[in-house]
Amino acid sequence: MLRGMRRRRGRSYLTTRTQRAVASRRVFPYLALVTLGLGLLGGFLVTLVDKRDFPTFGDGVWWAIVTLGTVGYGDIVPHTAWGRVVGSLMIVFGVTFIAFLTATVTSEFVSAQEQEARELERRREEATEKETHELLRTLKTQLDAIEAKLGGRG
C-alpha cells in the first residue's frame, strides 16, 4: 500500500523528489545531505575494510570527507586493496559533487541574468508603449486642430 502511494505513473518517490528539487532549483541541500551521508558511509566502510590505517570511525569519516572534498591531505591513506576501492569511490563521488555544485551555482547566475534581461526588456516595452501613446495623443491634438481650421472654412 505504502509503495503504491509513493509511486506516481511508474516513477519512484526518490525520482519524483529529485525532479521536483531540480525544477525548483533547490538541489544544493540534497547534494550536501547525500555527500554527508556518503562521507559517513565511506568512513564506516573504510573502518571495516582497513582497520590498520583507520582504527576509529572518526578517522574514517575525516578521511572520507577530506577525500570527498577533493582535498586529500594525505595524513591518513588506505593501504589495503579494499580500502583503495572505497577511496576510489569517494574520489569519484567527490568530483561529481563538485561538478554538480558548480553547475548549480552557474545555473543560478545564468537564471538571475536572464531574469534581469527579461525585466529590462519589459521596462523598455513599457517605455516604448508610453512614448507611442504620447505621440498618438500629440498627433490627435494636431489633427483636431487641423480639422477645426478646415471645418471653419467650410
Image (spheres, helix red, strand yellow):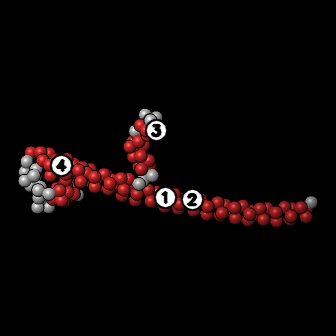
Q: Quick one: SS at disc 4? A: helix
Residue 149 relative to residue 132: left or right: right
* Residue on which disc 3 sits: 5
* Residue on which disc 2 sits: 122
Q: Residue 31 or 119: which is nearer the viewer? A: 31
Q: Disc 1 and disc 4: Cα gap in Å?
A: 45 Å
* Residue on which disc 1 sits: 115
Note whether 83 is above or below 113 in the view shown: above
Q: Disc 3 and disc 1: Cα gap in Å?
A: 37 Å
**Rendered location of residue 27, percent (x, y):** 38, 53
Q: Amino acid at mark 3?
A: Met
Q: Disc 1 and disc 2: Cα gap in Å?
A: 11 Å
Sooner in the amino-acid sequence: mark 2 or mark 4: 4
Q: Disc 3 and disc 4: Cα gap in Å?
A: 33 Å
Comparing marks 3 and 2, which lies closer to the viewer?
Answer: 3
| Residue 97 visible from this viewpoint | no
Note whether 149 is above or below 14 in the view shown: below
Sooner in the amino-acid sequence: mark 1 or mark 4: 4
Residue at screen point 64% across, 60% down: 129
Residue at screen point 14% across, 57% down: 56
* Residue on which disc 4 sits: 45
Q: Quick one: SS at disc 2? A: helix
